[in-house]
């Protein structure tokens, strides 16, 4: 007579195996924490400490000056616009690269990663040669917010595409086909079936793109021009403060940028997690 599987006791692990696994986990956590502290936490703590060298009044004065506020406005405003554009265009590009076949598809797919490998100052030189005073296409946007936006679009596009692309690969096409069979319009299918599944990854990619944009320096140096209160982003303003021998003010502005980036990433990550939890029961029900 066969014994039910539910009554069979699970195999006992060999002596010492659980202890070794626990030690290995502890060592891994310790090594990860140490590395994170050395590379991220300690430098951030040093910047924060440097920003309040002259007291909180000096910190407030540094980040509330007219030049600092203008740099924040240019940086955050342009970054928001760039992030929204790349979120829309990035999803379309990822969809085409995943779902469609066309000549040169592999080349286009490889070009998406080019901003990751290309030094950002080289990107600024290329953009200046294309859209500067001697533009071969007759477009002159140097020292304008448009030129600034083009540079940030270039360096942040891969974050959205590469974050969304794997999710599109894993989408349940049967659900899309079922919706089409039931007479749903393409727009309805995208809104009710596709977008809820893509939303968490899209928010994560948008957060990464925004964080990269507000801290970008190399790609905007030449094409943006760094005109104070017009096209000067916060990273360029920080450099000018260092050149003026004001490291405390430079650190204070840096801390504000870090805080903005952290808050945006945290909010988008929490929102993405909440959307993922809502989407999981829906997939299970299918």
Image (tube, rainbow, N blue to C red):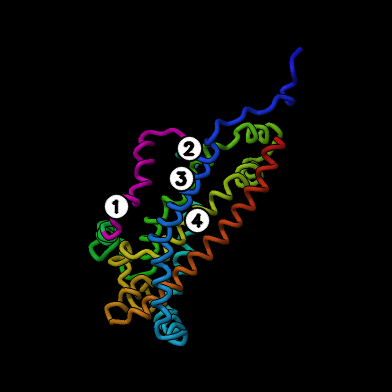
> Badge 3, how many Cα within 10 Å: few under 14, some, many 20+?
some
The CA distance from mark 3 to mark 2 is: 9 Å
Tell me: 5 left or right of 11. right
Q: How many labels does the image show?
A: 4
Q: Is mark 1 on a helix, strand or loop?
A: loop
In front of the other: label 4 or label 3? 4
Q: Residue 112: image x %, image y %?
A: 38, 46
- Is 161 above or below relative to 56? above
Name which of mark 4 and mark 3 comes first in the sequence: 3
Name the N-terminal-most of marks 2 and 1.
Answer: 2
* Element marked by disc 4: helix
Q: How crowded is mark 2: few (under 14 residues within 10 Å), some or many (20 or more)?
A: some
Horizontal and vertical percent for residue 262? Answer: 50, 64
Secondary element type, mark 2: helix
Q: Distance between the residues labelled 4 and 3?
A: 14 Å
| Closer to the camera in the image, 194 or 143 | 194
Ranked by sequence position, the earlier of labels 4 and 2 is 2
Q: Tag 1: Cα neighbours inside 10 Å, few (<14), some, or many (≥20)?
A: few
Return the residue at label 4: 206
**Distance Cα–Cα, label 4 vs label 1:** 21 Å
- Measured Cα–Cα span from mark 1 to mark 3: 20 Å
Does the magenta stretch mainly form a helix, a strand or a loop? helix
Q: Residue at x 27, y 64 (%)?
A: 132
Q: Mark 1 points at which residue?
A: 118
Which quadrant would the C terminus be assigned to in this image?
top right
* Residue denoted by label 3: 93
Q: Where is residue 167 in the image (x, y as percent from the top left)?
A: 53, 41
Can residue 138 be seen in this snapshot?
no
Check contact, mark 2 vs mark 1: CB within 8 A: no
- Residue where numbered disc 2 is placed: 98
């Amino acid at each position: 007579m066969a014994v039910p599987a539910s009554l069979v006791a699970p195999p006992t692990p060999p002596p010492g195996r659980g202890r070794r696994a626990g030690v290995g986990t502890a060592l891994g956590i310790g090594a990860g924490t140490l590395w994170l502290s050395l590379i991220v936490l300690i430098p951030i703590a040093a910047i924060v400490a440097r920003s309040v060298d002259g007291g909180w009044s000096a910190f407030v004065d540094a980040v509330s000056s007219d030049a600092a506020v203008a740099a924040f406005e240019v940086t955050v405003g342009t970054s928001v616009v760039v992030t929204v554009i790349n979120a829309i265009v990035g999803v379309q590009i990822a969809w085409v690269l995943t779902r469609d076949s066309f000549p040169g598809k592999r080349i286009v797919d490889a070009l998406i990663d080019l901003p990751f490998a290309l030094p950002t100052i080289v990107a600024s030189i290329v953009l200046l040669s294309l859209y500067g005073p001697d533009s071969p296409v007759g477009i002159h946007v140097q020292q304008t917010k448009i030129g600034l936006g083009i540079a940030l679009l270039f360096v942040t596009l891969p974050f959205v595409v590469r974050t969304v692309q794997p999710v599109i690969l894993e989408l349940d096409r049967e659900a899309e086909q079922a919706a089409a069979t039931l007479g749903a319009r393409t727009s309805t299918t995208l809104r009710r079936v596709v977008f809820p599944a893509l939303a968490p990854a899209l928010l994560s990619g948008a957060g990464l793109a925004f964080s990269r944009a507000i801290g970008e320096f190399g790609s905007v140096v030449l094409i943006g021009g760094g005109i104070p209160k017009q096209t000067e982003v916060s990273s360029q303003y920080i450099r000018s403060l260092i050149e003026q021998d004001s490291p405390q003010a430079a650190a204070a502005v840096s801390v504000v940028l870090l805080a903005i980036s952290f808050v945006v990433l945290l909010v988008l990550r929490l929102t993405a997690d909440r959307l993922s939890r809502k989407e999981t029961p829906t997939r299970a029900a299918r």
